[in-house]
Image: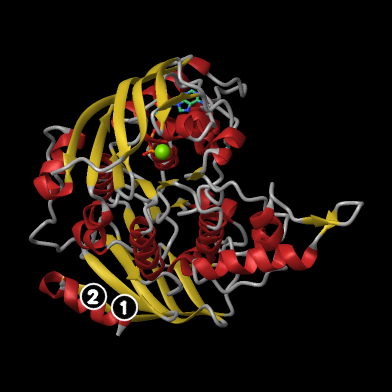
Amino acid sequence: MSMGTPVLEMKNISKSYSGGRVLKNISFVLEEGEILGLVGENGAGKSTLMKILSGGTQPNEGEIILDGRLIEITNPIVAKRLRIAMVQQELSLISSLTVTDNIVLGQEKRIGPLRTFDRKANEKYARQALKAVDLDVSLDAKVGTLSVANQQMIEIARNLIQEPRVLILDEPTTALTLMEAEYLLRQMILLKEKKTSIIFISHKLEEIMKVCDRMIVLRDGNKEGEVKKDEITRPELIKLMVGDREFFKRKSESKNSTGDVILETKNLSKKNVFSNISFQLHKGEVLGFFGLKGAGRSELFHSIFGADSVDGGEIFFEHKKVNFNNPGEAIKAGIGLVSEDRKFSGILPNMDVKDNILISNLMAFSNSVGVIREKSMQQMAESFIDKLKIKVHSVNQPVKRLSGGNQQKTMISRWLHTDSKILIFDEPTKGVDVGAKQDIYAQIKQFTEEGKGIVVISSELEEVMLVSDRIAVMKQGKIDTLLEGTDVDADVIMHHAAG
Ligand SMILES: Nc1ncnc2c1ncn2[C@@H]1O[C@H](COP(=O)(O)OP(=O)(O)OP(=O)(O)O)[C@@H](O)[C@H]1O
Ligand SMILES: [Mg+2]
């Protein structure tokens, strides 16, 4: 294949944080009008490499060459001037500002001698930006009141409207519905046809294989490979990313739904959200909840968990009627929930990894006079980090310094040592790499062996089929069907979810 026109080159880039080197001698060339995939496990260094390119952080060594000239991208403003735009993994919108304000931020149009905010022109610009991603939200809405998916689309819109030459997308689809993700992928192909160069980070390899021309694989801060899409299969790509590793398989005989019933709902309803939800969860089983986004799954379990109210119906926990007024009561009774939204799960970004892991069980580490045994806490935290292979330099590192996927694993590890009887996982592997998913599935399996009842809410068909004994398919707030055994079939599930 002939080389296209090189636009940009990163050359021998190295980066260290206090904890050690996170990028080692990375070099690659980006061509005009290509989509370059950047893949690798959680903590491999993908976001860091792209932050260097967009001026968010500086390399310790290495060069960046744009159009044949050596440049220094000392801050995000320089990047913007060079028309390099990055959609960050963690949303960077300001929730208290309106949609318009967020889109025009940093490039507000002003008029008159007093340079007053030109409302009309700014709104026109914002409207154009929304149109480019086909998003229909009110320009005056405060961004914080919108869904995460809509916020993500606004973030993308405000970057696209600046017509970058180099567009970096760091896991842009994690919060999107299937349809929104498809739409975004189509937009990317259109941009590519207009000669925009795109660097695309994703753990969803279907997406990568669908739109990328080439892929770069990072592993532990090293460049593990550079491959053209046509020259590699998906399994080969996975192997490059994770090396040799055993993959979790669905039990052919899925019959764990015979244990004692630990949780039951009867006709549980909440107006306009879910209605007539009746199911039983048994000890030692994984009950999957599949559905398209908006089917009411998260809301249902938020209500059961006491984070929200219900309008009707009953909940039985260990055969006793319950009605938790808040999550604290549910946790005390023995129910744990890992939410899809890390903020809802109560991540404490400024606290260290150890405290984030142990928070749900700090009491257990107090001796009879209430003094916390620091050393056993440390050991406990270390053993969990080991178990879920969380990538940290030390247990005393603030959680916000971890890569996105490793933050998610930290949230899951919170429940490893509790006496919970039921654990509810909402999109447990969102933003988690292919290898780490296996660690989480294995851990879920172990929970069932300990006799816990597990609920896994997932929008990933493959995942829900792999881990569940039975699958409840939800549609528009109702359980459309409950499948088990040989009835668990991808076509059947999709038929009920979408049909
Ligand atoms: N500001 C920081 N201070 C210290 N260490 C950091 C900082 N930012 C990132 N790291 C470390 O650098 C490594 C690479 O992180 P990075 O966020 O680039 O990974 P990633 O490949 O994007 O992972 P993910 O897929 O989970 O998003 C991680 O070990 C992370 O803990
Ligand atoms: Mg990242």
Mark 1 sits on what residue?
497
Q: Quadrant of residue 484?
A: bottom left
Q: CA distance from mark 1 to mark 2?
A: 6 Å
Q: Amino acid at mark 1?
A: Ala
Q: Amino acid at mark 2?
A: Ile
Q: Quadrant of residue 425?
A: bottom left
Q: Residues within 10 Å of mark 2 (few under 14, many from 20)?
A: many
- Determine the residue positioned at 28% across, 48% down: 444
Q: Position of residue 44 (x, y in %)?
A: 33, 30
- Determine the residue positioned at 56% across, 45% down: 346
Q: Which mark is residue 493?
A: 2
- Camera-side residue: 444 or 245? 245
Q: Position of residue 498 (x, y in %)?
A: 32, 80
Local SS, label 2: helix
Taking the image as four quarters, which one is ligand 1 found in? top left
- Camera-side residue: 9 or 272? 9
Task: Mark yes or no: residue 388 visible.
Answer: no
Using residue 429 as the reference point, say whether residue 104 is left or right of it. Answer: right
